[in-house]
Amino acid sequence: MPNYQLTDHPANTFQSVYQPIKFNARASTTNRDAYVSSKVTITPFDNITDAELTDQKVSIRVQPSINIPNYNSAGNTPNNNYLYYSIDVSSICRDFLSYNLRPCTHDLSTMVRRDITQGEISNNVYQKFTVTFQLEVISGGELVDSGEIIEVEGEDVFVPDEDSGTFIATNSALLHEEEHYLNIGGKLLSDNDFVYQGAGLSNVYLHSAYSLRGLSRQKYLTTKPTSYRIIGVDECEYLSFLNYDNGTDVRAIVRFRGFNGSLIGTDVSGSTNAYTMTITKTVDGEGNNGSNINSWANSGSTDEEYSVCQIGIGTRNIKETNRERFNDNCAVTDFTNIKFYDVYTEVAGGDQIGETVRYYIDHTRQRVDGVRFHWQNRLGGIDSYTFDGAFTEGINISSKSYEQSIYPDFRGQLGQSTSDTKINIGENPLYAEDYGALVPRVAGLTDDKYPSVRKSQVKAVKEGTAVSRPYGVGEQDMFEDLLASPNVWIEKGWVGKEVFRESFDYADFAAYNTDWYASGGGSGDVSFSTTDGQLSGTKTIVIGNDSGNDELFSYHRKAIPYNPKSIYEIEIRMKSSGTSNGTHYCGFVGLAADGTTLISSSGIANLSPAHYVTLNSYDQTANDRWETFRGYVSGNSDSYTSNAHDPNNPSTAYTGVRYIKPMFLVNYNDQSDITQIDYIVVREYQTDIPNSKGWYSTLNRNYYVPVVIKDASVTTFDNENLQRCTVNYIESKAKRTIQ
């Protein structure tokens, strides 16, 4: 009876589908002619449930390799009683993989418009496979692969049961020299004489509590430099890593530092590093909520698990993250006081695993200036970069034209009457009113609805050119990846600008009252604190002393022009630390076109009721924790909606409003409390897209358009240490053809 077994197979871990994934099987038998082939079955698994996807499995018939003699150790003589079967499955597995990239969205079910896909399992980037070998014999004219004895040519032949191997395929392409040296490094690290195929990928990129991976050196699936990255104050970015869950959770940590280099934090509660953010799995690759949000392992199994994890780590991703992801619920929603932040992975016990990635914030780039590119790098992750040099964009239109023939239903030509005109051909009269005049058609001189010259095959393609800032040799690999990537996107969405910011950096109430109108019992209890974890400016405004009447109504004296075609976002960051008996309001005071006449939310010439689009009678818990709220307004109508937290369904200003003044009312109605405000910001989002609110119904302010890099050029400066890249791209989404 033959002995059938795998003699060489990849490690049961991550394997690059752009490197050979080889399986070799050997059958020991003296009846070599009986076993004509081996059926090889490649079976994918569901990354969530770990169930076999039987409807997607692929089977291939492999013929035995040419005779490869084995020499016995005793006599060193050939032993040909073996059959060998070999296959490389990398190209097959490659067809199962793609990418994961989701725009920065949020959950509108919460009052605070912040709960995004901060961390997810990238199900499209990796796939578990089992490769099964089954010997086959011909019996009765049919191939048989069952584990039983079959009669072949009058002899009993045993067909052994299958043998199989399992691995995880991933969309990572290592360079040849990387594969070579990583495998050598894996041997040194593991202190083993034998290293399975593909072990090098896991040696460097796998994040796990496994003993060899607690040295703060594990890398991420990126080709961008990790020690120094630049990002704007409102940009998306993603970081991916390979993960192995053997019972100890892996998480990502973000720490923020101010301009003096110290960690942001000590809140009034006394908690140090209050703004540290912890990122764990929140959804799976399809956007469904995971049942185990504290683990990157798939929720459908308790076994040891491999996965590819992606975290949204850009400034916009962070600002849209639920505050529960931060220590003591102290969320970062503004980066004014932050110089840079660090990102790394660690085990739940606190030991760092991955190397530290540092993001320096470019405060001059308030919104995306230029073009923000996202692309799938050669390691399977998503890298991002803003080309903020010169930028042009336009439409390239091409078409074919032809002169149209005469149509039978044509009536009249050059004013000629055709009522009795006949053309006699033989015995059949042909009427000009049915067939048209026998003269060339002249455009514009007939009553025919068809033009004489028409276009066909019209193609309108949106093209653009973007130029990068100067970069050094450390970023060359990143640009090479961008130009070679099969999947490239540019980030689009609302282009907004700050039209108002108040950070409350006042010396006293008298100075404050020069910019803000204020009334109420709390006017005498207003102070300005410098020690309360503010994210904007150096101070916060403190209203009330938790005794007596601490109510304060206040609106800014500056009138902001209101464009009904724009969408305005009014954001406030505040907290309560008193008895919290009062409620809070925030929005704007409306004014007519003369800039003086008041227009309330009910249409009367009065301050009250104001347009409470951000907060309306909100009872804030006295937990001494900062909260951020955002409200939206666009257009005019005879009614408005309070608490308009959905940018796709904003409130409206009352008819006639052409100026707005930010306002707040705290500790209402004449209640005792202590309320602090860090900042109030008003942003204007302009768009010329009709019905833009519906346009962004699911995209929520940013979306990704696929593009093709048509060509590129690199310019080297005199010092030869800096380069500038220029790319010409085509938006594949905008391409349309009319036949």
Image (cartoon, rainbow, N blue to C red):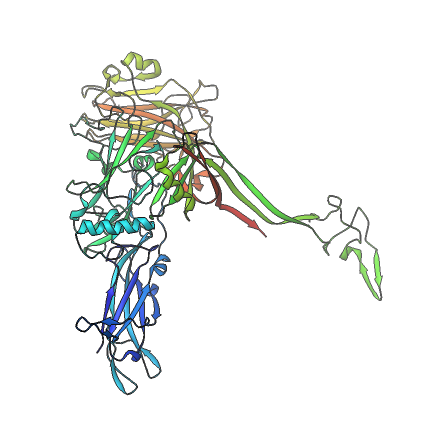
User: Residue 608's spot in the image, x, y percent?
Assistant: 36, 23
Residue 642, visible in the rendered structure: no
Residue 162 visible from this viewpoint: yes
Which one is in front, 117 or 659? 117
The N terminus - image quarter: bottom left
Q: Is the residue 295 above or below the residue 565 in the image?
A: below
Observer-nearest of 210 and 299:
210
Q: Is residue 524 left or right of residue 95?
A: left
Q: Residue at x 25, y 52 (%)?
A: 183
Residue 470 placed where, x, y %? 41, 32
Find residue 57 and report its image quarter.
bottom left
Q: Is residue 575 above or below residue 700?
A: above
Residue that extends furthest to the bottom in the rendered view of this protein: 154
Q: Where 452 falls versus 49 (above or below)?
A: above
Most foreground residue, 686 or 166? 166
Exactly how many numbered labels are in the figure? 0
Left or right for 401, reference 658: right
Q: Position of residue 554 (x, y in %)?
A: 32, 20
- Work out whether residue 103 or residue 545 is closer to the camera in this orientation and state it: 103
Q: Residue 398: where, in percent of width, then height?
A: 59, 45
